[in-house]
Amino acid sequence: MDRVAVLVDAGYFFAAGSALVSGSGNQRRDSLIFDEKSAVKELEALAQRVAQNSPLLRIYWYDGASRKTGPTAEHSRLAHCNNIKVRLGFLNSAGLQKGVDSLIVTDLVELARNRAVGDVVLVSGDEDVRIGVQLAQSFGVRVHLVGVKPCAGNQSPELRQEADTCTELDISVLKKIISMRQPAVSLATPAAVANKRPVSVAKSTSVPPSNTSVASAPATGVAAAANVAPGLEAVVESALSELAPSEIKGAVDYMTENTNNVPHELDSKVLARCKGKLGQYLDDESRRKVRKYLRQRLRELAPKS
């Protein structure tokens, strides 16, 4: 079979890619903006170059997901792209992905054994997948290893030796896929949290006034409709100002498919900042109001199709 499959270890891709784009070492995933459509486009073009125009079977994207919250909004956006299949391991308590290498090895062997492909483009740097490369080659599949420049510093030498060909992605390609998020706007520093019990925002008299200006101020009446405390409007607006238009649209799509629930990573970020703003936990009613306001603003800011 002359088809080609692309297998991407997202952990490696983001770690090495963010170091190259930022120029200052590996960056946290939440500090990156990921353009999934550009990623698919560039990976499809890469497959055509290294596999001499063989037809694409599909792109396999391997990543870790929290056992508690499941797939992220980013995973959901990727899964809805054409020609891509998201395969998820899990994240341990330290935030490290587990089970991903075994998924890659399994798919390498099964694709080769079933003669589904003649070439595989593998974006990874971990020596643990080397056995999968060897077994795929034993079935006649050519494995083309792709790394992020400089590969000598972020890929296993043994893995590079095992591959049939080696290719580097340079910064011109990575910048189409990954960009750095603007730093969060600093809000007023709260007093130390002395009492951990939830406190109602509506009854609190210790909410510090906010003089933080945000790039996209809410329309008059939105906060009133949600009945959210004025001091927390700027917290929500600050979090939203950090999102790319594609991330806002992705969050709205996620809500549509998940009974109006905000993506967990955005929800937890906003609630944590609200707690930090007030210096106290929000009670259930206050969280409900903040989430309502957040959903309203996401729908207002979402790019119109």
Image (cartoon, rainbow, N blue to C red):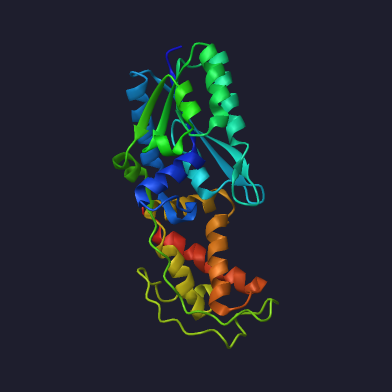
Taking the image as shown, residue 28 lies to the left or right of residue 43, namely: right
Q: Is residue 114 left or right of residue 28?
A: right
Residue 303 in the image: above or below residue 58: below
Count of numbered badges drawn on the protein: 0
157 horizontally vs 203: left or right: left
Residue in the picture at 45% in, 26% down? 160
Q: Nearer the viewer, residue 164 or 188?
A: 164
* Residue 193 drawn above or below residue 5: below
Position of residue 53 measured from the top left corner of the image (x, y, whole percent): 33, 19
Whether residue 231 sits left or right of residue 18 in the image: it is right
Q: Residue placed farthest to the left in the image?
A: 172
What x and y, as percent, mark residue 123? Answer: 45, 32
Residue name at image x 48 percent, y 72 percent: 235
- Position of residue 262 relative to residue 155, above or below, is below
Kindly give the residue lying farthest to the right in the view shown.
Answer: 197
Q: Quadrant of residue 172?
A: top left
- Look at 52% across and 49% down and name the residue there: 73
Instruction: Give x and y (percent) for residue 95.
Output: 59, 50
**Do we see residue 166 in this rendering?**
yes
User: In this orientation, which residue lies closer to the viewer: 290 or 159?
Assistant: 159
The residue at 57%/68% (across/down) is 272
Q: Please name whichever residue, 77 or 126, is drawn nearer the observer in this view of the structure.
A: 126
Residue 99 image point, x, y percent? 63, 36
Residue 305 seen anywhere in this rendered image of the structure: no
